[in-house]
Structures are given as structure tokens and as C-alpha cells.
Amino acid sequence: MSSIRNDKMTSETQDRRIETQYEINAPVADVWRALTDAEWLTNWFPLEARITPGTNGIPGVGGSIWMAWGGHGSETEIDIWEENKHLRLIRSVPADPELKGTMSPLEVAQDFYLEAQGGSTVLRLVHAGFSTDASWDWEYNATTRGWKFELGGLKHYLEKHNGVKRIVVQASLILAGISYEVAWSALFGAAGLLSGGSIEGLRQGDHFDFTTSAGQTFRGRAQIINPPQDFTGTLENFNDARLRVAIDKSCDMPGEQSVTLFISTYDLPQEKREALQQGLEAVLESMASAVPASS
């Protein structure tokens, strides 16, 4: 199938797409490297990455990029490789007999366009090929939300920690039979992240200062506020680390909800990372105990 490769969509495919643009205060070569170098990819995007060379033995067309997050990996084929200008990755989705009114199999394409503006780079993403069938709604919506966090993370990495290795601290919890709203209320309550302080009325760019039920203080700037599923902000008191709070469907237990606390740290001493880890786990344990049993 070549509908995505040729930038043409049939009426059967009725593709949905995500289009977004970021200005990053970094040279084009650095943005390109962050998209195409396995080590730099793990400094802002996946937890693991691997680049498979193309037919000529060097990274490029015919090769692939594999990325994984805690055991959940995926591989995309490199379809266009115009260094410092245009990268296209293709993910093939097998035919699914349950999909109605769509062409299947599908090819979902990620196009990254880079343009220099002075010493900065304008990065434009077009992620196309999502079916309009209702069975694709969750993937489309989750991917839209995910790119807001991930591309914000790319900007944060290159502008604040360019070339510095990222070490992730995270904790997650499955809450069976709990709605997003109930989980959010418990997480952003006294037994969760807000033992002291508040995010009430907080907007993008606003400063926050709150203390968790584990006694840790988080101070920084809000970046994404999307209740009852997403909160992202910088952590100025942890060397400009970046916090993500996500409430979503569990990938490991279908039908259940997961709560994930995820912090990207840079040049943070090991003892502080270990304390953060323990604190996140304690917050989720305390938060779980506060969820009403009838929820």
C-alpha cells in the first residue's frame, strides 16, 4: 500500500492527521540528531532506541528506528531521509477484520520537517494515516496528547540540557474500575500530590509550588494542564527536571486505568533520584488508599 508514501489518501481511508509546530532554540543539526540518533532520542523520547542502517550500511532510507518504553516497543521504517530537512517514518498496521469503512492494512506516517530560522529551528510534525473508524479513536486521541508532551520534551531537552544524558524516574499504579475523574481527584488531593499547595486556576506558564503526601516539594512552571488526564511541568528545584502526570488506559491490563508519574532528570545526583523514586511510589500508595471503594 502506498497511499501515505505518495501523500495521497483515498476516500476509503479517510485519514485523520495530527499537525503541530514548535520553534526550538537550537541549531537544525541538533534537532536532526535528536530525531535520528539513538542516544539522543533516549534523552527526550523513548527509554530505549536502536537505529538499523539502510541498504548502504549507514542510517537512512531502507533502515528503521526501533523505540521502546518499558517493554512496549515499536519499529518504524525510514522512508525519507533528507538530512537536516525532512524525516519520514512509516509504521505498518496489519489488516484488522473489525475495522469497517476503512482501507486496511494502513500505513501511519510521521513526517518531521526542519527549517532554520537564525540560530533556532522550526520543527513541523505531520502524523497522518489514522483511520476514522471509532476503533481508532483512543489511539488517535492518545497520540495527539502524547505529542504535546513529547515535543515539549524535545524543546526542553535541547534548550535546557543539550547533550546531557536523561535518567528517568517513574512509578505507576493500576486502579481497577476507576474513572479518570475519580483518579484525578485522588491524585491531586491531600493524599496524593497536593498535601500542601494547589493547582486550582493554574494556566500554562504559571508558577506552581506544592508539597506531596510524601513530603517532597515540587516547584516549577506548568506546561500542560488537561484534567482529568494530563499535567506536565518543569521542576526547577530538581535541576530543571520535567514532570509528567498521566492517567490513561492501561497497556498491561485492558479495561483498567493506569496512573503514571514520570520525571525526566538531567545531571541530578543519584541520591536525589533515589529519593524522588521513593517519593513517587509513596504518593501512589497513599493516593490509592484515598480512592473511594464504591468508585
Image (spheres, rainbow, N blue to C red):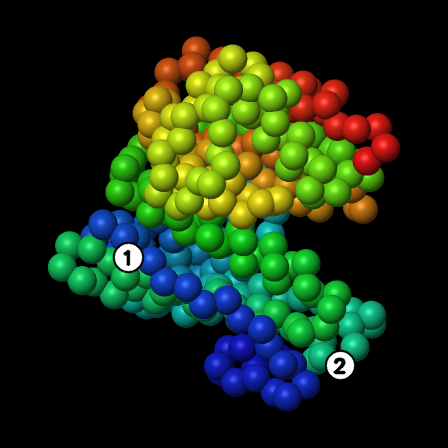
Residue type at tag 1: Glu
Of the numbered discs in the image, which one, if any, rests on residue 232?
A: none
Q: Residue at x 35, y 22 (%)?
A: 237
Tell me the quarter of the picture where residue 117 sits: bottom left
Number of other residues with Cα within 10 Å of mark 1, as a class: few under 14, some 14 to 19, many 20 or more: some
Number of other residues with Cα within 10 Å of mark 2, as a class: few under 14, some 14 to 19, many 20 or more: few
Q: Which residue is at the front of the view, 106 or 50?
A: 106
Residue at mark 2 = 101
Judge whether 125 appears above or below 201 on screen: below
Tell me the quarter of the picture where residue 107 sits: bottom right
Q: Quadrant of the C terminus?
A: top right
Residue at mark 1 = 23
Judge whether 71 appears above or below 241 on screen: below
Q: What element does badge 2 sit on?
A: loop
The mark that comes first in sequence, 2 or 1, is: 1
Outermost residue toward the bottom? 11
Q: Is residue 45 visible?
A: no
Q: Is residue 82 visible?
A: yes
Is residue 232 found left or right of 282 in the rendered image?
left
Is residue 31 found left or right of 62 in the rendered image?
left
Residue 250 at x, y percent in the picture: 72, 42
Q: What element does badge 1 sit on?
A: strand
Q: Give the tally of numbered discs.
A: 2
Judge whether 185 appears above or below 25 on screen: above
Judge whether 167 appears above or below 9 on screen: above
For the residues labelled 2 and 1, the Cα–Cα distance comes to: 37 Å
Residue 25 at x, y percent in the picture: 23, 50
Outermost residue toward the left? 118
Q: Which residue is at the front of the view, 55 or 98?
A: 98
Q: Quadrant of the N terminus?
A: bottom right
